[in-house]
């Protein structure tokens, strides 16, 4: 009886917390922030393309991470907080600064010298699929069931369609597409690494990301000094793109992401994955006048369906009962 009472009290406490969370989410507007985040991250691929007209991949990434870190450091100072500078989390943040930001950013910037911002943005949508696959392989609590298995198959078929592996454009730029895919796998590894080693430390998320970006900016700055040549010209649109890519597409976007998680939860935030390719595609077609192949949006839709199945986001059919 005592055990049942403890269970009942615990269940009641969980329901009360869920009710409070929903009430708090309803009281704090988040949809406008979500739309802003979708637009900001979606336009990042356009900014990378424009910046690549006068900077190489190392310089673009250094500028992006420098201005991103600067925005977060200013935000922390304005709110009376500090970046993470000591403790066991620093080594993890230093590594995440490479696998979550520096390396993927460099690869995307390099790839967009060969492929369109549309293609890069669409390939980026595979990140959640890789996260789901790696979670199943690495995390014991994540089990591969029939629905997830079907989702993985659908997702990888979608990748083949998205890339247009039968098309001459893919064969000519296969290495660039591969670089984008490696980047999204890096994002996925970073998510799981953060969940396993960083989240349990209870660090301030914005302070932690500011530290990540600072470490990433340092390594990219060194790489730029060693391997890059000085730009021969400084077009205003290119310079503005680098500043916007860092300040908004990296720093400001991460603040928005954190606020949305606070107000609406992780599930609502994860839905940005579905909207980023739409924004990046529209921006590429309308502003840069890039060509859109029929198979790219089709493949993206198939990938997103696979992601929804792997991440178990689709509602399950209710069991029917017989009278």
Image (cartoon, helix red, strand yellow):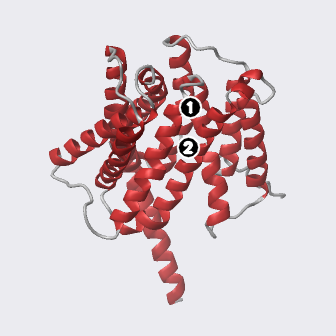
Q: Is residue 315 left or right of residue 4?
A: right
Mark 2 packing: few (<14 Cα in 10 Å), some, or many (20+)?
many
The residue beneath circle 1 is: 111
* Closer to the camera in the image, 53 or 312: 53
Between marks 1 and 2, how big is the CA–CA gap?
Answer: 10 Å
* Closer to the camera in the image, 153 or 13: 153
Whole-percent x, y for residue 206 in the image: 31, 50
At 67% from the left edge and 25% from the top edge, which residue is drawn?
297
- Which label is found at residue 183? 2
Mark 1 packing: few (<14 Cα in 10 Å), some, or many (20+)?
many
Q: Is residue 152 above or below residue 48?
A: below
**SS assignment at label 1:** helix
At 66% from the left edge and 35% from the top edge, which residue is drawn?
175
Sequence order check, earlier mark of 1 and 2: 1
At 59% from the left edge and 48% from the top edge, which residue is drawn?
185
Q: Is residue 299 left or right of residue 211?
A: right
Q: Is residue 77 left or right of residue 169?
A: left
Whole-percent x, y for residue 304 in the image: 66, 38
Whole-percent x, y for residue 178 in the image: 65, 39
Q: Is residue 222 above or below residue 32?
A: below
For marks 1 and 2, give the one nearer the viewer: 1
Q: Is residue 13 above or below residue 274?
A: below
């Amino acid at each position: 009886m005592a055990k049942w009472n403890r269970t009942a009290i615990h269940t009641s406490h969980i329901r009360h917390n869920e009710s409070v969370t929903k009430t708090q989410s309803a009281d704090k507007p988040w949809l406008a922030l979500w739309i802003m985040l979708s637009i900001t991250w979606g336009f990042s691929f356009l900014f990378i393309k424009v910046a690549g007209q006068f900077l190489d991949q190392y310089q673009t990434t250094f500028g992006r991470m420098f201005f991103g870190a600067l925005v977060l450091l200013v935000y922390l100072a304005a709110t009376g907080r500090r970046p993470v500078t000591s403790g066991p989390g620093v080594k993890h943040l230093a590594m995440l600064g490479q696998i979550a930001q520096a390396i993927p950013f460099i690869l995307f910037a390099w790839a967009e010298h060969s492929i369109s911002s549309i293609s890069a943005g669409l390939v980026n949508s595979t990140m959640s699929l890789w996260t789901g696959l790696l979670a199943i392989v690495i995390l014991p609590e994540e089990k591969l069931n029939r629905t997830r298995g079907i989702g993985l198959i659908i997702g990888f078929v979608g990748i083949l369609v998205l890339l247009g592996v039968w098309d001459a454009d893919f064969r000519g730029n296969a290495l660039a597409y591969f670089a984008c895919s490696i980047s999204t796998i890096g994002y996925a590894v970073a998510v799981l690494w953060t969940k396993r080693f960083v989240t349990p430390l209870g660090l301030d998320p914005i302070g932690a990301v500011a530290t990540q970006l600072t470490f990433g900016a340092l390594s990219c700055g060194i790489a730029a000094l060693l391997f890059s040549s000085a730009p021969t010209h400084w077009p205003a649109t290119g310079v503005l793109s680098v500043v916007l890519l860092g300040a908004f597409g990296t720093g400001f976007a991460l603040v928005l992401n954190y606020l949305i998680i606070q107000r609406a939860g992780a599930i609502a935030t994860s839905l940005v994955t579905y909207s980023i390719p739409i924004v990046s595609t529209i921006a590429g077609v309308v502003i840069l006048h890039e060509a859109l192949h029929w198979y790219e949006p089709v493949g993206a839709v198939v990938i997103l369906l696979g992601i929804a199945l792997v991440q178990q986001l689709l509602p399950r059919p209710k069991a029917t009962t017989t009278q």
